[in-house]
Image: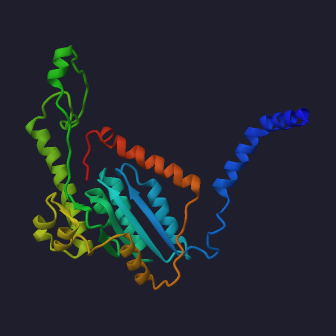
Amino acid sequence: MFKKISDIIKWIGQHFMGMLFLLIVLIVFLPSSHEPLRKANLQEIKLFGPIMDAEKIIKEIDEAKKDENIKGILLNVNSPGGAVPPSIEISYAIRALQKKKPVIAYASGIMASGSYYSAIYATKIIANPGAIIGSIGVIMESANIKELMDKIGIKPQLVKQGEYKEAGTPTREWTPKERAELERLTKDTYDLFISDVAKARGLDINNSKTYADAHIFLAHRAKEVGLIDEVGIISNAKDALLKETNITKPVWKKKDKLESFIEELSSQALFKVQSYFYGLKAEL
């Protein structure tokens, strides 16, 4: 009797890792029994965390645009913004997607600066009552660490060609010409930003001081100045999407569990490191 028990325990010990691996594979990759058999006809795309790179979300947008079964998109936004080029990439990708199928953008937390830029071409923008909207502006910053370098005895050496090649350096105070060059760059970027916002939202660009100028708004004030269409919660955003698509039996596309887990970890990590990786560049 004891030998049989011992043999069973020994077998379990020998095969435990294999059984555990098989169990994880089954949990992660096999569909749940309660999942509908019908093909998904709606999809949620999340724009969470600082916008440093657009590759992943652009891929999701392109796949949604090509998928004929997907009739509408919910763009769920909770982002403080980020770098200029990826914000514009996302914005223009949403514009192209919206021409083929409805896109409802939902501000679940923060839809500001670059993330607002990303959402402007949605069919409709709906914001949670407590959401922060706006911050239509551009910033470029760098520390001046010359005094610190002098104290610890560090002297920079460089060779350059071009008067403005050192513009934005943290090793000394900027010259008036360098500052003017950087101000022109941020002004050009800001003009592009407000031009696209005015065009997408049907706003008067000559009245941009009321809705742009880096103002930040709570949802109801954002609606008053025309930055969003409605104030509501996520169920309102989903209802709006159903109305736009005329879908009576919604089936939302689900990501596999492993992908969702990795996405959650990545999102949390991005929030924690957002202030460390921007460096000197124009940001929205």
Residue under the image location 70 percent in, 44 percent down:
21
| Residue 71 relative to residue 134: left or right | right
Colour convention: rainbow
Residue under the image location 75 percent in, 41 percent down:
18
Quadrant of residue 40 in the image? bottom right
79 above or below 96? above
Q: Residue furthest front?
A: 1
Name the spot of residue 235 as percent of width and height, x first.
39, 73
Residue under the image location 16 percent in, 71 percent down:
225
Q: Residue furthest left?
A: 176
Residue under the image location 19 percent in, 56 percent down:
137
| Residue 178 relative to residue 92: left or right | left
Q: Residue furthest top?
A: 153
235 above or below 179? below
Q: Which of these two is toward me, 36 or 63? A: 36
- Looking at the figure, which quarter contains the N terminus? top right
Quadrant of residue 157 in the image? top left
Name the spot of residue 100 as percent of width and height, x first.
44, 77
Q: Which of these two is toward me, 246 or 123? A: 246
Number of marks in the rendered image: 0
Q: Which of these two is toward me, 153 or 187? A: 153
Quadrant of residue 46 in the image? bottom left
Name the spot of residue 56 as percent of width and height, x first.
47, 55
Name the spot of residue 198 as percent of width and height, x first.
21, 70
Q: Which of these two is toward me, 50 or 279? A: 50
